[in-house]
């Protein structure tokens, strides 16, 4: 009953290091991930800015090699974050903070991989002086989600949210026009969890 070939049991020692099994989730399909809310003009520019991403799928999705791009002044989209392999829970929210002061990312449903995925070293900054264009792109280059915020909508301490909430469309609103609060990173505008459908 010996195992033949290159079968390697998860967690087996290999070269003195624990081999981690690959995440038990699949790459997202178009429509699974959504850039839903963004705070561009934060009070504290070194830590308050955030980008909220939703997993709309009924399944965990693997963020491996997914890129978050932001439009440079030249007009080209530049990769700001390339995600490590790891699962994002179904119907959950992830909040990516700009983290020049080490503010951890927020996960509405943490997974075993959340800590590694959101290590807190994304030092992007979102400019207040021009239109903001954000895109999530698969490792294959396929666009998964895009959000465009005109300069005229960028408001201090008020986030921009999809309208209707959690729907991929070009319609956006100031958060305080759909809720009594100026932003709701990681939850619905009314404060409810995305997981509680």
Image (cartoon, helix red, strand yellow):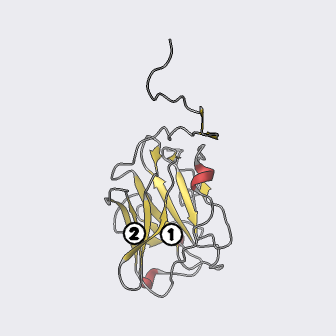
* Residue 123, x across and y down, in percent: 58, 72
Q: Are marks 1 and 2 in contact (CB under 8 Å)?
A: yes
* Residue 164, x across and y down, in percent: 41, 61
* Residue 132, x across and y down, in percent: 43, 78
The reply to whether residue 108 is visible in this rendering is no
Secondary structure at badge 2 equals strand
Residue with the mark numbered 2: 147
Secondary structure at badge 1 equals strand
* Residue 171, x across and y down, in percent: 36, 69
Residue count near mark 2 (Cα–Cα under 10 Å), binned few <14, some 14–19, many ≥20: many
Residue at 51% across, 78% down: 126
Rendered view: 124 above or below 141 = below
Rendered view: 43 above or below 129 = above
Report which quarter residue 168 is drawn in. Answer: bottom left
The residues tagged by marks 1 and 2 sit, at their Cα atoms, a distance apart of 9 Å
Residue at 47% across, 55% down: 54
Residue with the mark numbered 1: 38
The reply to whether residue 129 is visible in this rendering is yes
Residue count near mark 1 (Cα–Cα under 10 Å), binned few <14, some 14–19, many ≥20: many
Rendered view: 80 above or below 188 = below
As drawn, is 48 to the left or to the right of 150? right
User: In the drawing, what numbered circle is on residue 143?
Assistant: none
Direction bottom: furthest residue: 129
């Amino acid at each position: 009953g010996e195992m033949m070939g290159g079968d390697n049991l998860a967690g087996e020692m290999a070269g003195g290091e624990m081999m981690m099994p690959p995440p038990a989730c699949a790459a997202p399909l178009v429509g699974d991930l959504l850039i839903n809310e963004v705070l561009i003009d934060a009070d504290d520019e070194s830590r308050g800015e955030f980008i909220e991403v939703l997993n709309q799928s009924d399944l965990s999705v693997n963020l491996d090699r997914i890129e978050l791009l932001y439009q440079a002044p030249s007009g080209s989209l530049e990769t700001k974050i390339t995600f490590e392999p790891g699962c994002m829970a179904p119907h959950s929210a992830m909040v990516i903070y700009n983290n020049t002061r080490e503010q951890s990312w927020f996960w509405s449903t943490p997974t075993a991989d959340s800590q590694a995925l959101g290590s807190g070293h994304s030092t992007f900054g979102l400019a207040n002086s021009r239109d903001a264009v954000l895109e999530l792109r698969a490792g294959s280059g396929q666009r998964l989600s895009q959000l465009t915020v005109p300069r005229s909508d960028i408001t201090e301490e008020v986030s921009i949210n999809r309208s209707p909430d959690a729907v991929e469309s070009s319609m956006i609103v100031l958060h305080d026009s759909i809720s009594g609060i100026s932003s709701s990173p990681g939850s619905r505008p009314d404060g409810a969890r995305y997981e509680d459908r």
